[in-house]
Image (tube, grey):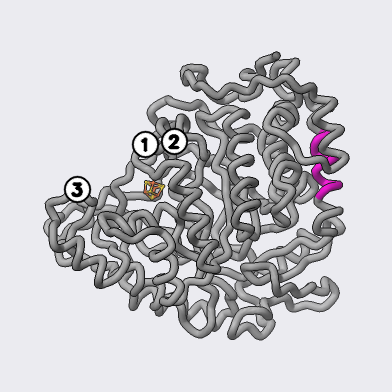
């Protein structure tokens, strides 16, 4: 048995976790299983992610062999197409009291109260404003609107939920009436209805938001998702997953739902017929054992529910976050770690077709490289991205179709515009500009944004 805890380079060793990257497997055996397409165990995964627990740090030659195996698996599973979606981010509010230590997206909700005169940099949008933003973006050709927000205390699922919360505001349910705030965000139902305009695909309501939408109520996640589906919700982002091992969540987001609750919410969304995505946010206090255990839980969830259309590894952007500012970590994941995370996502998750490379997190050059490490999806146009930007990310807020076509063609792959659920796909001919979206309800091939 060996210990690869020195595989991570940027993490202080002060976290005494029960889960450690130790195995009884060898790197060579694990790699052989990966090459043959045999389902990997947690020990196999740890061996590959650490490039062997028999030596400290990452072995570059072994890493290349893991990446090669993942790239080959990608080609076998999904071929040479690289997909992207025309989408818009419309986050409703930054007001949130959850206090996750990796997050710089939120602002304390007290700052948003009518009685508060202090300036703050946050925002809340009314349902009418959300509708207007989506309506305008539809004309530019988007297919999807993604909406992920802070847990504003005035947000309730719908009128029935609000009545229930208003009946006893003294209960500790993180609720305050909308009249107390400068701007009323409406209810989740009203926001979803407002964004569900003109046939756009609405991708919203993470498990954490679904928890907020049922706080203090007797109904469960199925009821929440089913009511939101009636309001126009089409699919659910599997964010707020972070690392699905509770000893890590207790350090980075102690006020968030547990990993069991996250999985329960995702299964409920699937059971009412909603597609979901799934994510991992890595590169903070966790070790390789946590990362592989996370992948294992996602694989099991997919075996049970089968609704995950893509897996999205999110490398932690640390610069402006409390975790970094308080000295709990020294930085994020290294490039080697990023590449191995993409590769293991492909190799371990044998039941999820698509692995995304996030250019918002990795940047253009490295994002493109990830497409040869196991990834086959290159995210979306994202016409605004406040979450990563506020955490110190610097890789821009939008991407034109022309840039997508040029970058993907340059590595010899096939650019493909897709729908959120990947069921609609359109190959883009690189010799036939101009390049614009054609799948959105009002898309007509006109470029979405200028280069
Ligand atoms: S990650 Fe989400 S829940 Fe946590 S503090 Fe940020 S906005 Fe709030």
Q: Which residues are magenta?
A: 64-73
x, y percent for residue 400: 65, 67
Q: Is residue 432 left or right of residue 245?
A: right
**Any part of residue 285 in sight:** yes
Count residues near mark 2 (Cα–Cα under 10 Å), then give few for <14, some for 14-19, many for 20+: many
Count residues near mark 1 (Cα–Cα under 10 Å), then give few for <14, some for 14-19, many for 20+: some
Q: Which residue is mark 2?
A: 249
Some atom of ligand 1 lies within 8 Å of the CB belonging to the residue at label 2: no
Mark 2 or mark 3, which has the lower sequence index?
A: 3
Q: Which residue is mark 1?
A: 254
Q: Is residue 168 left or right of residue 398?
A: left
Q: Is residue 55 left or right of residue 286?
A: right
Mark 1 or mark 3, which has the lower sequence index?
A: 3
**Any part of residue 358 in sight:** no
SS at mark 2 in the image? helix
x, y percent for residue 72: 86, 47
Which quadrant is the C terminus positioned in?
A: bottom right
């Amino acid at each position: 048995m060996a210990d690869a805890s020195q595989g991570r380079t940027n993490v202080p060793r002060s976290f005494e976790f029960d889960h450690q990257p130790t195995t009884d497997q060898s790197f060579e055996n694990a790699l052989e299983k990966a090459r043959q397409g045999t389902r990997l165990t947690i020990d196999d995964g740890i061996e590959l992610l650490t490039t062997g627990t028999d030596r400290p740090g990452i072995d570059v030659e072994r890493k290349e062999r893991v990446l090669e195996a993942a790239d080959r698996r990608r080609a076998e599973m999904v071929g040479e197409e690289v997909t992207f979606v025309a989408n818009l981010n419309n986050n409703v509010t930054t007001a949130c009291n959850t206090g996750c230590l990796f997050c710089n997206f939120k602002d304390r909700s007290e700052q948003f109260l009518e009685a508060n005169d202090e300036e703050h940099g946050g925002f809340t949008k009314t349902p009418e404003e959300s509708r207007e933003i989506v309506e305008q973006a539809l004309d530019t050709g988007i297919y999807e609107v993604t909406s992920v927000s802070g847990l504003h205390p005035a947000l309730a699922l719908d009128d029935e939920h609000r009545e229930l919360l208003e009946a006893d505001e003294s209960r500790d349910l993180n609720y305050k009436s909308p009249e107390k705030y400068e701007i009323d965000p409406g209810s989740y139902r009203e926001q979803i209805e407002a964004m569900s305009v003109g046939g756009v695909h609405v991708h919203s309501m993470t498990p954490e938001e679904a928890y907020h939408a049922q706080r203090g109520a007797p109904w469960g996640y199925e009821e929440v998702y089913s009511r939101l589906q009636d309001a126009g919700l089409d699919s659910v982002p599997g964010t707020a997953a972070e690392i699905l091992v509770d000893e890590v969540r207790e350090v980075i987001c102690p006020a968030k739902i547990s990993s069991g609750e996250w999985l329960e919410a995702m299964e409920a969304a699937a059971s009412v017929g909603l597609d979901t995505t799934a994510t991992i946010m890595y590169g903070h206090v966790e070790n390789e054992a946590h990362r592989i255990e996370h992948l294992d839980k996602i694989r099991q969830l997919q075996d049970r529910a089968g609704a995950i259309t893509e897996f999205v590894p999110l490398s932690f952007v640390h610069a402006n976050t409390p975790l970094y500012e308080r000295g709990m970590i020294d930085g994020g994941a290294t490039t080697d770690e990023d590449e191995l995370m993409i590769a293991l996502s492909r190799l371990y998750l044998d039941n999820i077709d698509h692995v995304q490379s996030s250019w918002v997190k990795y940047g253009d050059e490295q994002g493109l490289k990830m497409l040869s490490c196991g990834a086959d999806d290159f995210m979306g146009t994202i016409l605004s991205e406040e979450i990563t930007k506020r955490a110190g990310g610097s890789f821009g807020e939008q991407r034109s179709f022309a840039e997508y076509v040029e970058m993907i063609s340059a590595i010899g792959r096939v650019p493909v515009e897709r729908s959120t659920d990947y069921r609609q796909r359109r190959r883009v001919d690189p010799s036939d500009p101009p390049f614009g979206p054609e799948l959105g309800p009002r898309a007509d091939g006109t470029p979405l944004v200028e280069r």
